Amino acid sequence: MKWDDILATRASRMKASEIRELLKLLDQPDIISFAGGIPDPALFPKAEFAAAFSDVLSGDQATAALQYSVSEGYRPLREWIAGQMADIGVPCDAENILITSGSQQALDYLGKLMISPKDTVLCGWPTYLGALGAFNAYEPTYDRLDPMSNRSAEDYRIAAQAAGGRVKFAYLSVDFANPTGETIARAAREAVIDLADALDIAIVEDAAYQTLRYDGEAVPPILALEIARKGSIEACRTLYCGSFSKSLAPGLRVGWVCAGKEVISKLVLMKQAADLHSSTANQIVTHRVARDIFAPHVTKLRQVYGARRDHLLAALAREMPEGVTWTKPEGGMFVWLTLPKGMDGAELLAKSLATERVAFVPGRAFYADGSNGNTLRLSFSCADEAAIDEGMKRLGRLIRG
Protein backbone atom coordinates (compact mmCIF):
# COMPACT_ATOMS: atom_id res chain seq x y z
CA MET A 1 0.00 0.00 0.00
CA LYS A 2 1.20 3.53 -0.79
CA TRP A 3 0.55 5.27 2.49
CA ASP A 4 1.62 8.65 1.12
CA ASP A 5 -1.45 8.62 -1.13
CA ILE A 6 -3.87 8.69 1.81
CA LEU A 7 -2.00 10.77 4.37
CA ALA A 8 -3.31 14.20 5.36
CA THR A 9 -1.46 17.18 3.94
CA ARG A 10 -0.18 18.03 7.43
CA ALA A 11 1.79 14.77 7.51
CA SER A 12 4.25 16.22 5.00
CA ARG A 13 5.39 18.71 7.66
CA MET A 14 6.00 16.08 10.33
CA LYS A 15 9.73 15.38 10.38
CA ALA A 16 11.94 13.24 12.59
CA SER A 17 13.54 15.29 15.35
CA GLU A 18 17.26 15.79 14.85
CA ILE A 19 17.66 15.65 18.61
CA ARG A 20 15.90 12.28 18.89
CA GLU A 21 18.17 10.89 16.20
CA LEU A 22 21.23 12.24 18.01
CA LEU A 23 20.14 10.62 21.28
CA LYS A 24 20.91 7.28 19.65
CA LEU A 25 24.57 8.32 19.78
CA LEU A 26 24.53 8.06 23.55
CA ASP A 27 24.80 4.29 23.16
CA GLN A 28 28.22 4.64 21.53
CA PRO A 29 30.69 4.71 24.42
CA ASP A 30 33.53 6.47 22.61
CA ILE A 31 31.44 9.55 21.78
CA ILE A 32 31.47 12.50 24.17
CA SER A 33 27.95 13.84 23.85
CA PHE A 34 26.69 17.36 24.49
CA ALA A 35 23.65 16.67 22.32
CA GLY A 36 20.90 15.28 24.51
CA GLY A 37 19.60 18.12 26.66
CA ILE A 38 18.20 15.56 29.08
CA PRO A 39 18.41 15.53 32.87
CA ASP A 40 21.23 13.59 34.49
CA PRO A 41 19.66 10.26 35.56
CA ALA A 42 22.11 10.07 38.47
CA LEU A 43 20.17 12.96 40.01
CA PHE A 44 16.71 11.40 39.79
CA PRO A 45 15.12 10.97 43.24
CA LYS A 46 14.85 7.21 42.68
CA ALA A 47 14.45 6.18 46.30
CA GLU A 48 11.66 8.68 46.89
CA PHE A 49 9.79 7.55 43.78
CA ALA A 50 10.27 3.88 44.67
CA ALA A 51 8.86 4.46 48.15
CA ALA A 52 5.95 6.50 46.80
CA PHE A 53 5.00 3.91 44.17
CA SER A 54 5.22 1.13 46.75
CA ASP A 55 3.10 3.01 49.25
CA VAL A 56 0.46 4.05 46.70
CA LEU A 57 0.11 0.64 45.06
CA SER A 58 0.02 -1.28 48.34
CA GLY A 59 -2.29 1.08 50.20
CA ASP A 60 -5.73 2.63 50.07
CA GLN A 61 -4.99 4.57 46.86
CA ALA A 62 -4.12 1.51 44.76
CA THR A 63 -7.54 1.23 43.13
CA ALA A 64 -7.72 4.94 42.32
CA ALA A 65 -4.16 4.91 40.96
CA LEU A 66 -4.98 2.11 38.51
CA GLN A 67 -8.46 3.27 37.52
CA TYR A 68 -9.68 5.80 34.95
CA SER A 69 -9.68 9.32 36.30
CA VAL A 70 -10.87 12.84 35.47
CA SER A 71 -9.36 14.54 32.45
CA GLU A 72 -8.38 17.67 34.39
CA GLY A 73 -5.89 15.69 36.45
CA TYR A 74 -5.38 14.55 40.05
CA ARG A 75 -6.80 17.34 42.17
CA PRO A 76 -4.22 17.32 45.01
CA LEU A 77 -1.47 17.66 42.39
CA ARG A 78 -3.30 20.54 40.70
CA GLU A 79 -3.73 22.23 44.08
CA TRP A 80 -0.02 21.82 44.83
CA ILE A 81 0.87 23.31 41.43
CA ALA A 82 -1.53 26.21 42.05
CA GLY A 83 0.38 26.92 45.27
CA GLN A 84 3.67 26.92 43.38
CA MET A 85 2.22 29.25 40.76
CA ALA A 86 1.10 31.66 43.48
CA ASP A 87 4.67 31.72 44.82
CA ILE A 88 5.91 33.09 41.46
CA GLY A 89 3.20 35.72 41.17
CA VAL A 90 0.35 33.77 39.56
CA PRO A 91 -2.60 33.54 41.99
CA CYS A 92 -4.90 30.80 40.75
CA ASP A 93 -6.69 27.65 41.89
CA ALA A 94 -6.93 24.04 40.79
CA GLU A 95 -9.55 24.89 38.16
CA ASN A 96 -6.89 26.93 36.33
CA ILE A 97 -4.64 23.86 35.97
CA LEU A 98 -4.80 21.03 33.44
CA ILE A 99 -2.40 18.10 33.85
CA THR A 100 -0.83 16.97 30.57
CA SER A 101 1.52 14.16 29.60
CA GLY A 102 4.54 16.45 29.73
CA SER A 103 4.54 20.04 28.54
CA GLN A 104 5.17 18.70 25.02
CA GLN A 105 1.59 17.42 24.96
CA ALA A 106 0.45 20.85 26.09
CA LEU A 107 2.14 22.42 23.07
CA ASP A 108 0.43 19.94 20.77
CA TYR A 109 -2.97 20.69 22.31
CA LEU A 110 -2.44 24.43 22.02
CA GLY A 111 -1.48 24.10 18.38
CA LYS A 112 -4.55 21.97 17.74
CA LEU A 113 -6.76 24.42 19.62
CA MET A 114 -5.65 27.59 17.88
CA ILE A 115 -3.91 26.96 14.54
CA SER A 116 -5.77 26.60 11.27
CA PRO A 117 -3.78 26.02 8.06
CA LYS A 118 -1.89 29.17 6.98
CA ASP A 119 -2.34 30.92 10.33
CA THR A 120 0.76 32.59 11.71
CA VAL A 121 2.67 31.69 14.88
CA LEU A 122 5.13 34.24 16.22
CA CYS A 123 8.26 32.67 17.69
CA GLY A 124 11.90 33.30 18.43
CA TRP A 125 14.67 32.94 15.85
CA PRO A 126 15.88 30.35 16.95
CA THR A 127 13.20 28.60 19.00
CA TYR A 128 12.52 25.25 20.65
CA LEU A 129 12.61 22.48 18.04
CA GLY A 130 9.91 20.50 19.85
CA ALA A 131 7.52 23.42 19.58
CA LEU A 132 8.06 23.62 15.83
CA GLY A 133 7.42 19.88 15.64
CA ALA A 134 4.21 20.18 17.66
CA PHE A 135 2.86 23.13 15.68
CA ASN A 136 3.92 21.95 12.21
CA ALA A 137 1.18 19.32 12.13
CA TYR A 138 -1.40 22.13 12.02
CA GLU A 139 0.23 23.79 8.98
CA PRO A 140 1.08 27.26 10.23
CA THR A 141 3.28 30.00 8.87
CA TYR A 142 5.99 31.31 11.19
CA ASP A 143 7.03 34.90 11.69
CA ARG A 144 9.95 36.18 13.71
CA LEU A 145 9.07 37.52 17.15
CA ASP A 146 11.41 40.27 18.28
CA PRO A 147 9.55 42.13 21.04
CA MET A 148 12.16 44.88 21.40
CA SER A 149 12.20 45.78 17.71
CA ASN A 150 10.28 48.67 16.17
CA ARG A 151 8.05 46.32 14.20
CA SER A 152 4.39 47.24 14.66
CA ALA A 153 1.41 45.04 15.39
CA GLU A 154 -0.07 46.17 12.09
CA ASP A 155 2.99 44.91 10.21
CA TYR A 156 2.59 41.44 11.79
CA ARG A 157 -1.12 41.52 10.93
CA ILE A 158 -0.51 42.42 7.28
CA ALA A 159 2.16 39.73 6.89
CA ALA A 160 -0.18 37.09 8.35
CA GLN A 161 -2.98 38.12 6.00
CA ALA A 162 -0.62 37.90 3.03
CA ALA A 163 0.24 34.34 4.13
CA GLY A 164 -3.44 33.43 4.01
CA GLY A 165 -4.47 33.50 7.67
CA ARG A 166 -4.15 35.56 10.85
CA VAL A 167 -1.75 35.71 13.78
CA LYS A 168 -2.95 33.29 16.47
CA PHE A 169 -0.34 33.33 19.22
CA ALA A 170 3.19 34.20 20.25
CA TYR A 171 5.30 31.29 21.54
CA LEU A 172 8.22 31.98 23.88
CA SER A 173 10.59 29.83 25.90
CA VAL A 174 11.14 32.48 28.52
CA ASP A 175 13.77 31.28 31.01
CA PHE A 176 17.11 29.76 29.92
CA ALA A 177 15.53 28.94 26.58
CA ASN A 178 16.12 25.78 24.65
CA PRO A 179 18.30 26.15 22.56
CA THR A 180 20.09 29.40 23.42
CA GLY A 181 20.06 29.34 27.21
CA GLU A 182 19.00 32.98 27.18
CA THR A 183 16.33 34.56 29.39
CA ILE A 184 13.82 37.07 28.08
CA ALA A 185 14.18 40.33 29.99
CA ARG A 186 11.28 41.88 31.88
CA ALA A 187 10.96 44.77 29.43
CA ALA A 188 10.69 42.31 26.52
CA ARG A 189 8.04 40.30 28.38
CA GLU A 190 6.03 43.47 28.93
CA ALA A 191 6.41 44.30 25.24
CA VAL A 192 5.07 40.86 24.27
CA ILE A 193 1.94 41.54 26.34
CA ASP A 194 1.53 44.90 24.57
CA LEU A 195 1.90 43.23 21.17
CA ALA A 196 -0.53 40.43 22.05
CA ASP A 197 -3.09 42.95 23.27
CA ALA A 198 -2.74 44.96 20.06
CA LEU A 199 -3.10 41.85 17.87
CA ASP A 200 -5.71 40.20 20.14
CA ILE A 201 -3.73 36.94 20.20
CA ALA A 202 -2.72 34.43 22.86
CA ILE A 203 0.72 34.07 24.45
CA VAL A 204 2.12 30.58 24.99
CA GLU A 205 4.73 30.79 27.76
CA ASP A 206 6.98 27.72 27.86
CA ALA A 207 8.53 27.58 31.33
CA ALA A 208 10.06 24.09 31.27
CA TYR A 209 13.36 25.33 32.77
CA GLN A 210 11.96 27.97 35.13
CA THR A 211 13.19 26.30 38.34
CA LEU A 212 16.78 25.84 37.13
CA ARG A 213 18.22 29.29 37.91
CA TYR A 214 21.84 29.32 39.10
CA ASP A 215 22.50 33.04 39.47
CA GLY A 216 20.99 36.42 38.67
CA GLU A 217 17.59 37.80 39.62
CA ALA A 218 14.44 35.85 38.76
CA VAL A 219 12.17 37.55 36.20
CA PRO A 220 8.40 37.30 36.80
CA PRO A 221 6.57 35.02 34.36
CA ILE A 222 4.68 36.74 31.56
CA LEU A 223 1.46 35.45 33.12
CA ALA A 224 2.38 37.10 36.44
CA LEU A 225 3.10 40.40 34.70
CA GLU A 226 -0.21 40.21 32.84
CA ILE A 227 -2.16 39.44 36.03
CA ALA A 228 -0.50 42.45 37.67
CA ARG A 229 -1.89 44.59 34.85
CA LYS A 230 -5.34 43.06 34.55
CA GLY A 231 -6.15 41.93 38.07
CA SER A 232 -7.08 38.28 37.47
CA ILE A 233 -5.91 35.23 35.55
CA GLU A 234 -9.39 35.07 34.04
CA ALA A 235 -8.71 38.35 32.20
CA CYS A 236 -5.39 37.14 30.77
CA ARG A 237 -4.41 35.79 27.35
CA THR A 238 -1.25 33.98 28.52
CA LEU A 239 -1.09 30.19 28.80
CA TYR A 240 1.75 29.02 31.05
CA CYS A 241 3.18 25.56 30.29
CA GLY A 242 5.11 23.87 33.11
CA SER A 243 6.72 20.49 33.60
CA PHE A 244 8.26 18.13 36.15
CA SER A 245 10.54 16.65 33.49
CA LYS A 246 13.55 18.81 34.32
CA SER A 247 12.93 19.14 38.07
CA LEU A 248 11.94 15.56 39.04
CA ALA A 249 11.88 12.96 36.23
CA PRO A 250 10.93 13.09 32.54
CA GLY A 251 9.89 9.47 32.20
CA LEU A 252 6.70 10.00 34.21
CA ARG A 253 5.46 12.52 31.60
CA VAL A 254 3.73 14.96 33.94
CA GLY A 255 3.30 18.58 32.89
CA TRP A 256 0.61 21.22 33.11
CA VAL A 257 -1.06 24.24 31.58
CA CYS A 258 -2.06 27.16 33.79
CA ALA A 259 -4.54 29.65 32.30
CA GLY A 260 -8.00 31.14 32.60
CA LYS A 261 -10.81 28.67 33.18
CA GLU A 262 -12.47 29.37 29.82
CA VAL A 263 -9.51 28.13 27.79
CA ILE A 264 -8.70 25.35 30.27
CA SER A 265 -12.21 23.98 29.69
CA LYS A 266 -11.48 23.82 25.94
CA LEU A 267 -8.21 22.00 26.58
CA VAL A 268 -10.01 19.52 28.86
CA LEU A 269 -12.23 18.58 25.92
CA MET A 270 -9.10 17.97 23.83
CA LYS A 271 -7.63 15.84 26.60
CA GLN A 272 -10.80 13.76 26.74
CA ALA A 273 -10.71 13.18 22.99
CA ALA A 274 -6.99 12.39 22.88
CA ASP A 275 -6.06 10.14 25.81
CA LEU A 276 -8.79 10.70 28.45
CA HIS A 277 -6.24 11.63 31.13
CA SER A 278 -2.56 11.39 31.98
CA SER A 279 -1.42 8.39 34.04
CA THR A 280 -3.26 8.52 37.37
CA ALA A 281 -0.58 6.55 39.20
CA ASN A 282 2.15 8.84 37.91
CA GLN A 283 0.20 11.91 38.97
CA ILE A 284 -0.40 10.61 42.49
CA VAL A 285 3.24 9.61 42.92
CA THR A 286 4.51 12.89 41.44
CA HIS A 287 2.34 14.79 43.92
CA ARG A 288 3.75 12.84 46.86
CA VAL A 289 7.36 13.29 45.82
CA ALA A 290 6.92 16.97 44.91
CA ARG A 291 5.12 17.67 48.19
CA ASP A 292 7.88 16.02 50.22
CA ILE A 293 11.17 16.93 48.51
CA PHE A 294 10.67 19.41 45.67
CA ALA A 295 12.45 22.42 47.19
CA PRO A 296 15.58 20.62 48.52
CA HIS A 297 15.81 18.50 45.36
CA VAL A 298 15.74 21.56 43.10
CA THR A 299 18.42 23.16 45.30
CA LYS A 300 20.61 20.11 44.67
CA LEU A 301 19.99 20.30 40.90
CA ARG A 302 20.95 23.96 40.87
CA GLN A 303 24.23 23.23 42.63
CA VAL A 304 25.23 20.37 40.31
CA TYR A 305 24.08 21.87 37.01
CA GLY A 306 25.37 25.31 37.94
CA ALA A 307 28.85 23.91 38.54
CA ARG A 308 28.74 22.11 35.18
CA ARG A 309 27.69 25.30 33.41
CA ASP A 310 30.57 27.18 35.01
CA HIS A 311 33.02 24.48 33.97
CA LEU A 312 31.75 24.48 30.38
CA LEU A 313 31.98 28.27 30.09
CA ALA A 314 35.56 28.17 31.39
CA ALA A 315 36.45 25.38 28.93
CA LEU A 316 34.94 27.32 26.03
CA ALA A 317 36.96 30.40 26.96
CA ARG A 318 40.09 28.26 27.04
CA GLU A 319 39.58 26.09 23.95
CA MET A 320 37.55 27.99 21.34
CA PRO A 321 39.37 29.73 18.51
CA GLU A 322 38.89 33.38 17.64
CA GLY A 323 35.61 34.09 15.86
CA VAL A 324 33.50 31.70 17.94
CA THR A 325 31.01 33.28 20.35
CA TRP A 326 28.62 31.74 22.87
CA THR A 327 25.85 32.60 25.30
CA LYS A 328 26.38 32.78 29.05
CA PRO A 329 23.12 31.45 30.54
CA GLU A 330 21.98 32.12 34.10
CA GLY A 331 20.34 28.70 34.28
CA GLY A 332 18.92 25.79 32.31
CA MET A 333 20.94 23.18 30.42
CA PHE A 334 22.25 24.84 27.24
CA VAL A 335 24.95 27.03 25.75
CA TRP A 336 24.54 28.30 22.18
CA LEU A 337 27.59 28.68 19.95
CA THR A 338 27.85 30.90 16.89
CA LEU A 339 30.58 29.76 14.51
CA PRO A 340 32.50 31.94 12.05
CA LYS A 341 30.60 32.87 8.89
CA GLY A 342 30.76 30.18 6.26
CA MET A 343 30.89 27.28 8.70
CA ASP A 344 27.94 24.89 8.97
CA GLY A 345 26.99 23.07 12.17
CA ALA A 346 25.61 20.02 10.38
CA GLU A 347 28.74 19.60 8.30
CA LEU A 348 30.84 20.09 11.42
CA LEU A 349 28.89 17.35 13.22
CA ALA A 350 29.35 14.90 10.35
CA LYS A 351 33.08 15.59 10.41
CA SER A 352 33.16 15.29 14.19
CA LEU A 353 31.47 11.89 14.24
CA ALA A 354 34.05 10.64 11.75
CA THR A 355 37.07 12.12 13.55
CA GLU A 356 36.89 13.80 16.96
CA ARG A 357 33.83 11.83 18.19
CA VAL A 358 32.11 14.69 20.02
CA ALA A 359 28.36 15.22 19.53
CA PHE A 360 26.27 18.39 19.58
CA VAL A 361 23.08 19.62 17.90
CA PRO A 362 23.46 21.68 14.70
CA GLY A 363 21.62 24.97 15.07
CA ARG A 364 19.78 25.16 11.77
CA ALA A 365 16.97 22.86 12.99
CA PHE A 366 15.95 25.45 15.60
CA TYR A 367 15.12 28.09 12.98
CA ALA A 368 11.65 27.98 11.45
CA ASP A 369 13.14 29.01 8.09
CA GLY A 370 16.18 26.70 8.29
CA SER A 371 18.61 29.62 8.33
CA ASN A 372 21.74 30.35 10.40
CA GLY A 373 23.57 27.12 9.79
CA ASN A 374 26.69 28.47 11.53
CA THR A 375 25.29 27.70 14.99
CA LEU A 376 25.16 24.74 17.36
CA ARG A 377 23.76 23.81 20.77
CA LEU A 378 25.74 22.30 23.63
CA SER A 379 24.07 20.70 26.64
CA PHE A 380 26.04 20.44 29.88
CA SER A 381 23.44 18.60 31.99
CA CYS A 382 24.96 15.11 31.69
CA ALA A 383 28.65 15.99 31.27
CA ASP A 384 31.14 15.73 34.11
CA GLU A 385 34.25 17.92 34.33
CA ALA A 386 36.52 15.43 32.56
CA ALA A 387 34.07 15.05 29.67
CA ILE A 388 33.70 18.82 29.37
CA ASP A 389 37.46 19.38 29.34
CA GLU A 390 38.16 16.70 26.74
CA GLY A 391 35.05 17.47 24.70
CA MET A 392 35.80 21.18 24.36
CA LYS A 393 39.42 20.42 23.50
CA ARG A 394 38.18 18.18 20.67
CA LEU A 395 35.56 20.70 19.53
CA GLY A 396 38.11 23.53 19.44
CA ARG A 397 40.44 21.36 17.39
CA LEU A 398 37.60 20.45 15.04
CA ILE A 399 36.60 24.09 14.45
CA ARG A 400 40.20 25.12 13.80
CA GLY A 401 40.30 22.43 11.10
Image: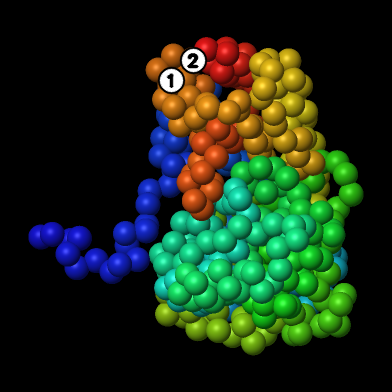
> In the rendered image of this protein, does residue 77 appear above or below residue 20?
below
Residue drawn at x 51%, y 31% is 345
Residue 28 drawn at (x, y percent): 42, 24
Residue on which the image places disc 2? 356
Could you tell me which secondary element the residue under label 1 belongs to?
Answer: helix
User: Percent x, y for residue 393?
Assistant: 62, 14
Pointer 2 or 1: first along the chain = 1
Marks 2 & 1, CB-CB < 8 Å contact: yes
Can the viewer see residue 226 in this picture? Answer: yes
Residue nearest the viewer, comparing 335 with 147? 147
Callout 2 amino acid: Glu
Cα separation, mark 2 vs mark 1, equals: 8 Å
| Residue shown at the point (61%, 50%) measured from the top left | 125
Q: Amino acid at mark 1?
A: Lys
Residue nearest the observer in this picture, 10 or 81: 10
**Residue that mark 1 sits on:** 351
Q: Is residue 31 visible?
A: no
